[in-house]
Amino acid sequence: MPHPPYGITREYPEMDFDTALGAVTDALATEGFGVLTEIDVQATLKTKLDVDYPRYRILGACNPPFAHQALTAEPLIGLLLPCNVVVAERAEGGSLVSMLDPARIFSLVGNDDAAPLAEDVRTRLERALDRI
């Protein structure tokens, strides 16, 4: 699976999907993020389209103090929240975790007040990935 320029991605070839999903949730919590939403893409595609797809979850992660700061700096930043995190099963075994890079996404906003916050969130997300 390619590593997108708008994400922070790590591969865990020895870690099965369920273990990776639990490790991501725990690592995010350590950095102050909770999971607000969870979309089971595999189940949705099977139910809605009868398409088989590898295990793939989209987690909507949120750190309330950072979300408040972002909304204060840029009221419509909610269009880009929460921070999406993908946990995917790799075809060759193991898992891949990719987190939306807030610094790249916040650059769309063009608000210099949001840049330091985006960098701080990025640093925390990278630390979470390093803990997995």
Image (cartoon, rainbow, N blue to C red):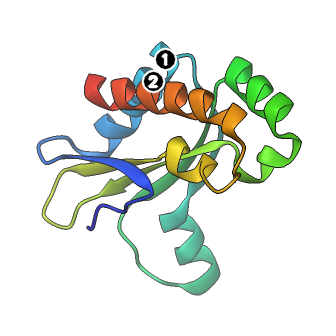
Tag on residue 31? 1
Q: Residues within 10 Å of mark 2 (few under 14, many from 20)?
A: some
- Seen from the viewer's position, the closer of residues 108 and 60 is 108
Q: Residue lying furthest front in this view?
A: 112
Q: Are marks 1 and 2 in contact (CB under 8 Å)?
A: yes
Q: Is residue 90 above or below residue 110?
A: below
Residue at mark 2: 124
Q: How far apart are the alpha carbons under marks 1 and 2?
A: 6 Å
> How far across and how far down the image is residue 1, in percent?
26, 67
- Taking the spot 42% from the left edge, 27% from the top edge, the residue there is 123
Q: Label 1 is placed on what type of residue?
A: Glu
Q: Residue at x 13, y 64 (%)?
A: 92
Q: Quadrant of residue 23?
A: top left
SS at mark 1?
loop
113 sits left or right of 95 in the view? right
Split into 4 quadrants, where in the image is the C terminus? top left
91 or 132: nearer the eye?
132
Classify 17 as above or below 55.
above
- Indicate the secondary structure of the residue bearing disc 2: helix
Asked whether 111 or 22 is in front, the reply is 111
Identify the residue shown where x is 18% and y is 50%: 94
Residue 24 figure quarter = top left
Residue 104 rendering spot, x and y as whole percentages: 51, 51
Residue toward you, 47 or 116: 116
Q: Is residue 20 depicted above or below 108 in this figure?
A: above
Please name which of the two marks, 1 or 2, marks the residue nearer to the observer: 2
Q: In the rendering, at what x and y percent does residue 12 appear?
A: 19, 43
